Amino acid sequence: MRKLVIRFNAPATLTFALLALGALLLGQTLGSGVTMKYFCVYRSSLADPLTYLRFFTHVLGHADYSHYMGNMLLLLLVGPGLEEKYGSGTMVWMIALTALVTGLVNFIFFPHTALLGASGVVFMMIVLSSFTAARKGEIPVTLILVVIFYLGGEIMDGLFKQDNVSQIAHIVGGLCGLVFGFTVRRGRR
């Protein structure tokens, strides 16, 4: 009889999910001030070293358990396949770059808005996953449909909805996924 083994199959994805859970628990335990100080990006002084940290850590912060679960379920569905295709190290860089870009966009263009959550990273992964079967010189139909349905929907929501969802983070994350899909070479684990 074969022995069943539990394997930490997607280290970058699983570590990200665990770090985000830690940030959520920290904020829930110590108060929302901790989340705001360390896990939200917003316009603040460039002389404050935490400003630069928040460009990356805002993707770990979540308002509540529901917000966390909404992002993590998608991340855990899409992330392992991408990590298998591109490698853990490449995924860490893609997550970090997406965090930086979404953080900078919010910092520069939305000075009165705080941004937190992994949805930009999730949208990057959704768009990137549509490149799974792409070959050189081809644009997969799945990519076209993802761009129309997901990014198109976010553009429409951004224009016509008034809610607490950052459609710009979704759009920027999706654009990062598009850029990564066309430029990043496939790695091997």
Image (tube, grey):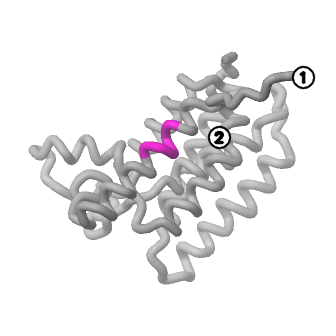
- Whole-percent x, y for residue 86 in the image: 66, 25
User: Where 146 falls versus 57 (above or below)?
Assistant: below
Q: Quadrant of residue 178?
A: top right
| Residues rendered magenta in the picture | 15-19
Q: Is residue 174 visible?
A: no
Residue 30 image label: none
SS for tag 1?
Answer: loop
Q: Is residue 182 left or right of residue 17?
A: right
Q: Main secondary structure of the magenta part?
A: helix
- Whole-percent x, y for residue 174 in the image: 60, 50
**Mark 2 or mark 1, which has the lower sequence index?**
1
User: Where 100 falls versus 33 (above or below)?
Assistant: above
Q: Kindly identify the amino acid type of the residue bearing the numbered disc 1.
A: Met
From the image, tell me which residue sits under label 2. 79
From the image, tell me which residue sits under label 1. 1
Of residues 56 and 152, the one drawn nearer to the viewer in this rendering: 56
Q: Kindly identify the amino acid type of the residue bearing the numbered disc 2.
A: Gly
Please tell me which residue is depicted at 52% across the width and 34% down the height of the picture: 94
Q: Is residue 114 visible?
A: yes
Question: Would you call the spot at circle 1 few (<14 residues within 10 Å), some (14-19), or many (20 or more)?
Answer: few
SS for tag 2?
Answer: helix
What is the C-alpha distance between the residues marked 2 and 1?
31 Å
Please tell me which residue is depicted at 83% across the width and 48% down the height of the picture: 142
Q: Mark 2 and mark 1 in contact? Answer it, CB < 8 Å.
A: no
Q: Is residue 63 left or right of residue 33?
A: right
